[in-house]
Amino acid sequence: MPLWQKMMIGLARSASVTRLMQESRYMGRFARRFVGGRDGDEGLARARALRERGLSASLFYLGEYVADPAEIEATRRALSGVAQGLGQAGLDVHLSVDPTQLGAMISWDACRGNVAALARDVAENGRGGRDVLMLDMEDSSVTEPTLDLYHTLRAEGLPVAVTVQAYLHRTEGDLARLVADGARVRLVKGAFAEPGRVAVTGRAERDEAYRRAIVTLLSPEARERGVYPVFGTHDHRMAAFAEHVAQVNGWQRDRWEVEMLLGVRPAWQRELADRGVSVRLYLPFGRDWWPYSIRRVGENPANLGFVFRSMASG
Ligand code: FDA
């Protein structure tokens, strides 16, 4: 990992810097680039504004690996509030959740109860078929229970979707089952430092695995089974490859999409949407905006100029 990125992760993890920044007036422009708002209402308002520009949203309440029951309950309530607002908003929204923010650190039974209740909120308030609860995929110690959770809720007829990581050796088998199920699947490269026995570790191998998974998710069989692929990537080569395979295999434009983080490569997001590709933006919301935002700067030093300009203008 480059030194620059290590420094930014250090800033993200520092409790004193986090407190200083989150209590300061810099939430302003800096955080708004990467974060949808301080609470669910602001997040939904931002999703509505994006919709007017032809972009869909995926709302995520900031926080992960939560072990404090009061914090888990606060997360559940914040997400339930958003789910209940979906009907009024008339949006095409994914509600993204990490199992470890909804009880998995305590027990998977507790997590299942919380996620099922949220999925029911989405089913009751959302637009059938389009608004879904998307399970994010965390480190490999929780891959199996996360997929089990997806399959259980799906069997109950709830509107759920799941993320898979191309870099895992197991993904080919997982995708075969998800394709047979006609699932809504978000494909990402994978963000955790996994050992070689679990995942490919080189960049080129990871990209190759991503391309193979694109071919699986955009196969004629997947189309016939009603699979809805979401390609979570900022890599224009992957998006171009997906566009090519989709065209060759006769996929309609509104049956698959590309999802990116809010604030990352905004010009390219616009360009893709203008070309007719369905684009969704991952829209985190909540009070804990600093660690998330500064990590994005760590991934791309070019964002530093943006930070200074934001601070200068308040
Ligand atoms: P990668 O980082 O490999 O970059 C490839 C190329 O893309 C770069 O060389 C550059 O050309 C271009 N590029 C990328 N970022 C750029 C930038 N900021 N500015 C300019 N050019 C840039 N992971 C996980 O393990 N579990 C999960 O649930 C999720 N969820 C998730 C949702 C969404 C919507 C996204 C976008 C990502 C995730 N991820 C994730 C993270 C994912 O696994 C992965 O780590 C990152 O997306 C980085 O990989 P990329 O495919 O974006 O390209």
Image: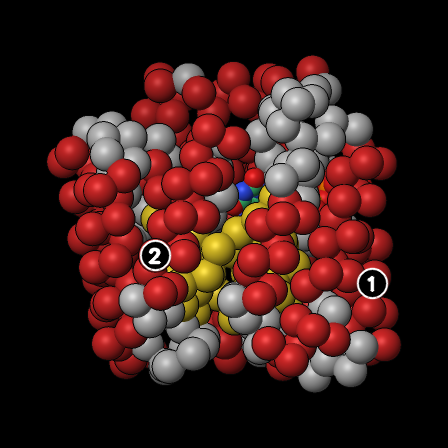
Q: Nearer the N terminus, badge 1 or badge 2?
A: 2
**Vertical side of 137 occupied by 5: above or below:** above
The answer to whether 143 appears left or right of 239 in the picture is: left
Q: Is residue 108 visible?
A: yes
Residue 190 numbered mark, or none: none
Residue 105 falls in image quadrant: top left
Residue farthest to the left, as pictured: 70
> On the image, numbered disc 1 is attached to which residue?
240
Q: The disc labelled 1 sits on which kind of residue? A: Ala
Name the residue nearer the viewer: 168 or 302: 168
Q: Residues within 10 Å of mark 2 (few under 14, many from 20)?
A: some
In the image, residue 121 above or below residue 91: above
The yes-or-no answer for disc 1 within 8 Å of ligand 1 is no
Q: Which residue is mark 2?
A: 152
Q: How many marks?
A: 2
Report the coloring of the rendering. Answer: secondary structure
Image: 19 above or below 164: above
Q: Position of residue 75 (x, y in %)?
A: 24, 46
Q: Is residue 98 visible?
A: no
Q: Is residue 118 left or right of residue 170?
A: left
Who's the residue at 72% across and 68% down the image?
218
